[in-house]
Image (tube, grey):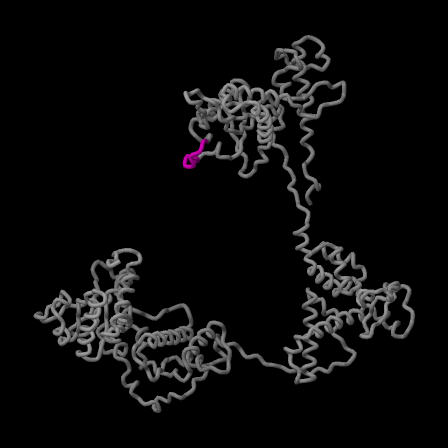
Amino acid sequence: MKVHVFGNCTSPAVAAYGLRKSADEAANQFGSDVKDFIQKHFYVDDALISVSTSEEAISLLQRSQEALRMHGKLRLHKFASNSEEVMAAISSDDLAKDLDFDSDHLPLQRSLGLHWDLALDAFTFHISMEGRPYTGRGILSTVHSIFDPLGFIAPVTIQAPTHGHTIPRLELCTALLAVEIKDYILENADISFNCVKLYSDSKVALGYIHNQTRRFYIYVANKVERIRRSTDVSQWNYVPTCKNPADEGTRSIPAENMKDSLWLKGPTHFLNVTEDALNLDQTHELVNPDDDREIRPTEALCVTKTKVSGNSSLGTHRYERFSRWRRLVQAIARLKIFARMHKDQKEQVKSTLAKVATYRDAELFDIKSVQRQVYGLEISCIQQNMHLPKDSSIYKLSPFLDADGILRVGGRIKMADLGFIEKTPLLLPGKHHVSRLLVLHFHEEVKHQGRSFTEGTVRSAGYWITGCKNLISSILHKCVICRKLRGRLDWQKMADLPKDKLEVAPPFTNVGVDTFGPWSVVSRKTRTGSASSKRWAIMYTCLVTRAIHIEVVDKMSSTAFINSLKRFTAIRGKVKILCSDRGTNFVGATDDLHIDTINVEDGPVKNHLYNSGTTWIFNPPHASHMGGVSERMVGVTRKILDSMLSNVSDHSLTHDVLCTFMAEVCAIINNRPLVPVSSDVDFPFVLSPASILTQKVGDSCTTTNDNPETFSLNDLYKSSWRRVQALSDAFWARWPFYHIQTFTFVSQPFGELQ
């Protein structure tokens, strides 16, 4: 590839690489100074360098121009210099286009965004005051429009902050900034420096840097640590404020005084003074350290000598401060190590801590202390070869003292072929805090298993804890991890049923709506086979009688839903309440999903519901249990349809067949018993939704009657019209006592929540 595309994201990186690669290849032929000039003094396609003599500049530019032409086929041109000798040595075609040597004044050159006056060899700044009012906003707009990245005219445009950090902190930050600038200059400058010195006019900051006796708070400590990491305290010196050029950068100086200011020329007289006159070796002490808020206060150290008698002990009540057995043992072990070190100065801490025997001694010390406190009377009796009191809690365990003076369980199995700790475990009281720490320790060792695991591990470790079973049960009951792993799940108590499911009303007055499907049906015959289309079903469930009504629709749209609702109300009567979930089938804003939905928020559906006096109620989001009546009926319907469709091939299922199946499904479901069938011969009536919908029992046909007279079961054996009314009265008479009572019991296996 010989040509590079201009404007790509990688173009600047590729161009810079090509320039540096050309410099590397030309270094042997044209010199290392050409390589350094191209690689270190170019910024994108601009180069800026300063050399000592005109001859050096001419040689460097000519060799660089030839090197880039030969090794990179790059033309280096548009030169500008403050030396007429350099400009005369370069071809006019390679000079900047706007240079006119016949003119009295050379034009300004832009060098990396700054205006360079070739005649004066100085940077100039132009300020535009057009259209800016003399207000705070106008002044800020004017100041921020000046491009001064090196801060040449900072005293004119910059003022010191009036709030924020304290003055000592700001002075310390400026010292840190000086260190960072020093590091940057040393890293990038081509000049080698014999000595680097830093000056500050803040005696507080110099005291911080030279400090060797006091401690600082975090902010100052971090700054001082960073400063001393890159510099030595001997490099820091004091400069009076009147001779500090950096001080003028924070003060306002008139523009006409900038030319002769210390900011641009520096304190020449101060720098020429000898080191002896400056007294650079002087030390800088802290300024008012007791009143400085950045310095930590000193604390007096008091040494107290205490004489300890031989019979004194730590006291096991101190053990209650520990929540882990291992921490208690480590604390006692460190105390014993410290006591040994105090006695023998040659003993090393690290070598002692590494010994397992030290921790074992600490464990035995803890157990022995507990036994001395709880079983002091029993131990005294054993030491004097006396019988234990019969009311002692460890009388039946036949305790004895081993060679270390620790109480162990005796028993009758000393001749058994077992280990010493299995035959004679250490004896501990179950109600002591140390016993609780031990059980908790071994419970965690077996990864929070049950009581048997924990108790077996305690016994295998050689401990006999009185009342161990109760202690383990108490610890397991309070263990948070065990409660998470094996805790009993809580159950939410079921709420009361809504009123629209309990009121006595005609069938299909309060209705639940749900959709299901689709099914693929044969729409028409073709030459090569048959064309199919989809069908969905809309189920209307009576919330009172649990009867269902199914309508088949050819598409999921507002028009199809309105037609099915009209057919339903034409057959079953006016609907008072419609209930459904908040699925995408009924909620709007689904056009962007490109799915088949029924949007009840559309104008046609909303207007139809308004005109018919019907209220549509949505269940809360993520509360599918509130539509459990409809969901249950959908599940039963699918089971019956699966049985029916198993005998029908896919090529013979048409719209009429599907509608017929839906009608048969409605008949089957509506004839189901709502309550368990009674075995009482005096109640042959089966309470089902069909008994109130069709007013028929068995093979008899009845007609309806609007006679408001009250009827009883005896009217079943009289005239036919009385039988119909008797069936209706029997349904509503048994409905509250048998069907409603089934909802009384709460489906909650563990009783009511506390």
Query: Any magenta on residue 607?
Result: no
Q: Which quadrant of the rendered structure holds the C terminus?
A: top right
Between 161 and 473, the residue placed more toward the observer is: 473
Q: Which quadrant of the rendered structure holds the N terminus?
A: bottom left
The residue located at (69%, 29%) in the rendering is: 741
Left or right: 160, with 229 as reference point:
left
**Residue 170 in the image: x percent, y percent?**
40, 73
The residue located at (21%, 80%) in the rendering is: 52
**Residue 177 in the image: x percent, y percent?**
37, 73
Left or right: 640, with 293 as reference point:
right
Between 177 and 86, the residue placed more toward the observer is: 86
**Residue 310 in the image: x percent, y percent?**
77, 80
The residue located at (54%, 25%) in the rendering is: 576
Left or right: 195, with 552 as reference point:
left
Query: Any magenta on residue 595?
Result: yes
Give the main secondary structure of the magenta stretch: loop
Q: Which region is colored magenta?
A: 589-596
